[in-house]
Structures are given as C-alpha cells and as structure tokens.
Amino acid sequence: MEVLNTSGRRKTSVARVYITAGQGNITINDRDIKAYFPSEVLQTIVNQPFQTLNQVGKYDVKANVKGGGVSGQAEAIRLAIAKALVSESADNRPGLKKEGFLTRDPRMVERKKFGKRKARRSFQFSKR
C-alpha cells in the first residue's frame, strides 16, 4: 500500500494526514497522540473512522495540523482519515458516510461587523 495523503478541515483547523500500512501508530505534529491530545475523548474522536470499519491497528497515521483549538483539530484529523480510507477502498464509504465522518462541518465564527460590539451584539442603548 502506498502513502495516502488527504486534508481535513473544521472551523479554522486544517489537518494534512499521511496514512500507511502499519501497527496503528498515530503521530500528530511529530508527537504521539497521547502527548498531543491528553484527553481520552479527543483520542477517541481521532480513532473513530478506524473503529467504525474495525481496522484499529492496521494503519500508521502521520498528521500535521494547525489553527483552531484542540477539538477542531481532532475533528479535522478525523475527516482527513475518513477521506483517506475512502480513497483507499470505495467499500469503506457507506459505513463512514452513515456515521457522518465524510461531512465537513462548515460552522465558523461569524465576523465582527462595524457599528456592533461583536458579530451581532449591539452596544448598550442609553436613552438618556
């Protein structure tokens, strides 16, 4: 199996993922997943595509991720892994699609407008 590389995004996070056949090692920004994401929940989010397809421990993942916060980064990595598994085999698509791992979450922070305190919040009104 050759190296599969894909990208995933979530909010302002961008992840580039390189997947090869291996023992299940996941490296994020040259650090182990347990060091990069100490939270068990975020580690689970990254591993969800493998768990859905019962392929835990079959692939090595090397990810470069930047921007956003930790949960956005974890979900960007999850999207990139799912896209890579689909490009490897089209049989993987229905299971990942059903779980929603192939959908990019488009929600982002709305920009601040002039004349407003935040995106929509106005300054406090004073009658006198």
Image (cartoon, rainbow, N blue to C red):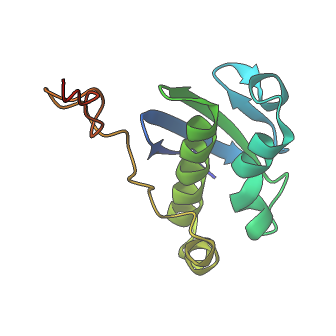
Q: Quadrant of residue 84?
A: bottom right
Q: Give the residue at the far front of this rendering.
A: 128
User: Observer-nearest residue: 38 or 61?
Assistant: 38
| Left or right: residue 97 compared with residue 29 | left
Residue 18 lies, with reference to residue 49, above or below; the image says: above
Q: Give the residue at the far top of this rendering.
A: 30
Count of numbered circles in the view: 0
Q: Quadrant of residue 117?
A: top left
The residue under the point 54% across, 44% down is 76
**In the image, residue 92 lies at what x, y percent?**
62, 73
**Image quarter hosting the C terminus:** top left
Residue 49 lies, with reference to residue 19, above or below; the image says: below
| Left or right: residue 2 compared with residue 33 | left
**In the image, residue 101 lies at what x, y percent?**
57, 63
The residue under the point 26% across, 27% down is 123
**In the image, residue 112 lies at what x, y percent?**
24, 30
**In the image, residue 32 lies at what x, y percent?**
79, 25
The residue under the point 64% across, 77% down is 95
Q: Quadrant of residue 71?
A: top right
Residue 22 seen in this snapshot: no
| Left or right: residue 104 compared with residue 49 | left
Residue 31 lies, with reference to residue 5, above or below; the image says: above
Residue 8 seen in this snapshot: yes
User: Observer-nearest residue: 93 or 19?
Assistant: 93
The residue under the point 54% across, 53% down is 79
